[in-house]
């Protein structure tokens, strides 16, 4: 009889645990997801990771390296920055962030992705750009471009799959040096590490040059083959799909072998690729795309260098 009671009790708890795990996850809307980022940032500058609602075996990465939560930027963050741009995906329980911090009182830029499940943080992915000039440029933007925050009318919104497909064409255009592959809006602009790198004739790779490919728009710049120094973009991970605002937040590794040092642009002669890319390197990039009427209207990115061919610790992610 006692054995029967034990068996029945065990079955009861198994059923109870199954029922608990089968419950739908409590909803976490935009405000909830952005709140998790703010809570994370507050804990970060307080250097207290265990004040957070963490899932078991939470995964933490910094610049593509898996390290214990509490190490890396957690040991050196000293204050919040002034720039904060959020991208929320309530359907997937994912939120992305581009912003700035202070690291031992030095400005740094940071990209963060959090995966939230049952109101617990399950994954933390970070890219820390330890370049005070980049962080200063990002903060000089003031506030995020209102274009990135504006909702897209429901009747004009693309599906998740459509938004991802459009964003993916951006990487295709870079790999094939072909802007015609990408549905760019004629007014498209790109900002990298706080600097506008399209339609900016004042941004010159060579201060003595009379012309710069940075003076061109998104499509025409691709068509110069300027980006032919990028051999491959892998993986391409589109993790946060903000359908309401038409924004896709992705994480990418741009692999650059350093074998392409110049390109011949019709009408402009030979244009030298920036010196940092004349040696093998990989760019660790968090990039978002504002998509409107099926076209890429704006791109904003944070990026830093990591060793050539660094793999992603999230290769199983889609």
Image (cartoon, helix red, strand yellow):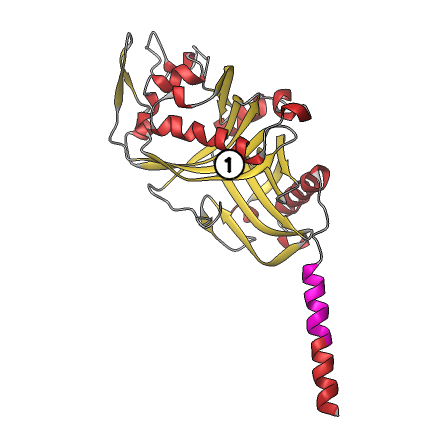
Residue 132 versus residue 79 in the image, above or below: above
Q: Tell me if 284 is positioned left or right of 36 in this view.
A: left
The picture quadrant where one finds residue 224 is top left
Residue neighbourhood size for the residue with mark 1, other residues' Cα within 10 Å, grouped as few (<14), some (14–19), many (≥20): many
Residue 275 or residue 88, whichever sits in front: 88
Position of the N terminus, as image quadrant, is bottom right
Residue occupying the point 44% across, 27% down? 170
The residue depicted at 46 percent of the width and 49 percent of the height is 314
- Image spot of residue 274 (x, y percent): 33, 24
Residue drawn where x is 45% and y is 16% of the image: 198
- At mark 1, the secondary structure is strand
Residue plotted at (47% across, 21% down): 183
Give, as a single range, the part of the protein colored magenta.
12-22
| Residue 105 appears in the rendering | no
**Relative side of 78 to 262, left or right:** right
**Residue 204 rendering spot, x and y as whole percentages:** 38, 15
**Residue 15 is a magenta residue:** yes
Location of residue 178 in the rendering, given as x and y in whole percent from the top left corner: 36, 22
Task: Specify the principal SS of the magenta part.
Answer: helix
Along the horizontal axis of the image, is 312 left or right of 247?
left
Between 183 and 43, the one nearer to me in the picture: 183
Q: How many marks?
A: 1
Q: Which of the 4 image quarters holds residue 290?
A: top right
* Residue 253 seen in render: yes
User: Which residue, given by chain and number where applicable, does mark 1 sit on?
Assistant: 250
As drawn, the residue found furthest toward the bottom would be 1
Residue 275: image location, x then y, percent = 31, 26
Q: Is residue 261 left or right of residue 196?
A: left
- Magenta stretch holds residue 302: no
């Amino acid at each position: 009889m006692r054995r029967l009671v034990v068996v029945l009790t065990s079955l009861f708890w198994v059923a109870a645990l199954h029922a608990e795990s089968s419950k739908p996850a409590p909803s976490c809307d935009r405000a909830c997801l952005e709140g998790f980022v703010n809570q994370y940032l507050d804990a970060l500058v307080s250097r207290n990771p265990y004040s957070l609602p963490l899932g078991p075996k939470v995964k933490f990465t910094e610049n593509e390296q898996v390290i214990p939560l509490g190490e890396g930027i957690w040991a050196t963050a000293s204050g919040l920055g002034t720039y904060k741009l959020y991208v929320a995906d309530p359907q997937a329980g994912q939120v992305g962030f581009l912003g700035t911090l202070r690291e031992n009182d030095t400005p740094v830029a940071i990209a963060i992705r959090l995966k939230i499940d049952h109101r617990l943080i399950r994954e933390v992915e970070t890219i820390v750009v330890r370049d005070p000039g980049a962080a200063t440029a990002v903060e000089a933007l003031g506030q995020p471009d209102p274009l990135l925050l504006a909702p897209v009318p429901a009747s004009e919104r693309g599906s998740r799959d459509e938004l991802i497909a459009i964003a993916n064409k951006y990487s295709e255009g870079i790999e094939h040096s072909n802007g015609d592959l990408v549905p760019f809006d004629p007014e498209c602009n790109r900002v990298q590490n706080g600097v506008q790198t399209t339609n900016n004739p004042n941004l010159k790779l060579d201060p003595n040059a009379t012309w710069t490919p940075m003076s061109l728009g998104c499509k025409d710049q691709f068509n110069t083959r300027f980006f032919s120094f990028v051999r491959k973009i892998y993986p391409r991970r589109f993790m946060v799909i903000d359908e309401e605002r038409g924004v896709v937040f992705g994480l990418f590794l741009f692999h650059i072998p350093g074998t392409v040092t110049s390109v011949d642009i019709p009408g402009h002669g030979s244009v030298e690729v920036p010196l940092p890319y004349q040696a093998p390197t990989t760019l660790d990039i968090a990039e978002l795309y504002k998509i409107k009427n099926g076209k890429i209207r704006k791109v904003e990115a944070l990026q830093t260098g990591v060793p050539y061919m660094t793999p992603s610790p999230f290769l199983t992610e889609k």
